[in-house]
Amino acid sequence: MLDVDTNSCEVMLMPNTVFSRLTRQWIISGKYIRRLNIPIAHALDLDVKRNFTNKVKQMEDNIVHKVLVAFDFDHTVIESNSDLWINRLAPGHKIPDELKSLYKKDGWTEYMQEVFKYLHREGCTRSAYEKCLDEIYLADGMRELITGIPLESSELIIISDSNSFFIDHILKKLGIRELFSAIFTNPASFDNKGLLNIEMYHEQDWCGLSTKNLCKGYILNEYVKSRAQKNVVFPHIAYVGDGTNDFCPSMRLRECDSTYPRCGFSLLNHIPKMETEKGLRIEAEVCPWDSGVEILELVLKYYKDLNTKEIPRERLRDPVKRKSDS
């Protein structure tokens, strides 16, 4: 090693020369190339800029561009509402009215836990749940959509207020579980007594558009950020849903994205209502759908020139905060 004056000195440039800012030393290896009389700072600036440019180019070369397709589950991937579908396991296919009143009081997740307790008392087993769920089928054109998307250039995820047991079992039964990169929903599992227990995905207090147990926009944003850390970016994001809780993730999208509200369901009417009454306008292209085939035809156009499309600096919009936070 050779100590040097960091302002100006006679510098020996050679291969594998490294400058340490902490020790202010040149660590020398290899043979001398030539002797120059230039300021160290200038030599360092040139070297840093060159290394930085090379690293940026290397990072850009390693970045993978994909289309992200995010799905709701009930009335979107499947034709039914899985939470209501299991009511047929109850005596007379009916949940007692005193249980239904809990929904307004405590929220949907707490309500479903009471339903599971009730069905457990009535002797409902895991196999009974599975047999019931086996009768659920995909929404029209959804198999064509899910299998028609170019998987090598895509990532498919589900964000749902159902639960992990229902979704995982249904997708496996339908033979499409492996096509989804991730599923975000309320965790659910059976205890040693055979009772199905459900937990809230999270308890949020920041989003004014979502229920306390599930902010879909937050989940979408966190997924995009986590993939960016792995050098995977999404020039286009498509969101497919049906209900008012799909408005939040739709609001987070940019102009380069698209959202697909299902015809005949609440989201389609909720979008213009929120713009008129609250001034909340979705930037993404809004494309109503009846069949998954329609979505496939529209989404495929976003794969053209995927690697050259510009990506917004802030990939998703900020959440709509609760009034108490603003």
Image (cartoon, grey):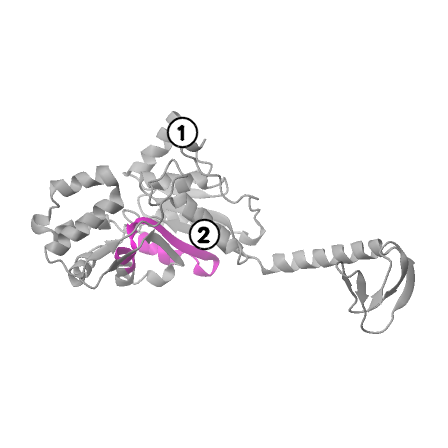
Q: Look at the numbered discs 2 and 1 and tell me whether their residues touch, using CB distance below 8 Å.
A: no
Amino acid at circle 1: Glu
Label drawn at residue 275: 1
Q: Earlier in the sequence, mark 2 or mark 1?
A: 2
In-front residue for pair 233/128: 128
In this picture, residue 128 sits left or right of residue 256: left
Q: Residue shown at 37%/46% (left/top)?
A: 240
Q: How many marks?
A: 2
Position above or below: 131 against 237: below
Distance Cα–Cα, label 2 vs label 1: 27 Å
Q: Quadrant of the N terminus?
A: bottom right
- Give the x, y percent position of residue 133: 20, 57
Above or below: residue 297 compared with residue 17: above
Name the residue located 43 percent from the left edge and 38 percent from the top edge.
251
Q: Secondary structure at mark 2?
A: helix
Residue farthest along the left direction in this orientation: 92
Q: Position of residue 47 (x, y in %)?
A: 78, 58
The residue type indicated by label 2 comes to Tyr
Q: Label 1's element?
A: helix
Between 150 and 112, which is closer to the camera in this rendering? 112
**Per the image, is 69 magenta?**
no
- The answer to whether any part of residue 66 appears in the image is no
The correct choice, above or below, for 1 with respect to 128 in the image is below
Residue 36 position in % (x across, y down): 91, 61
Q: Which residue is mark 2?
A: 223
Highlighted range, magenta: 142-168
The residue closer to the viewer here, 137 or 145, is 137
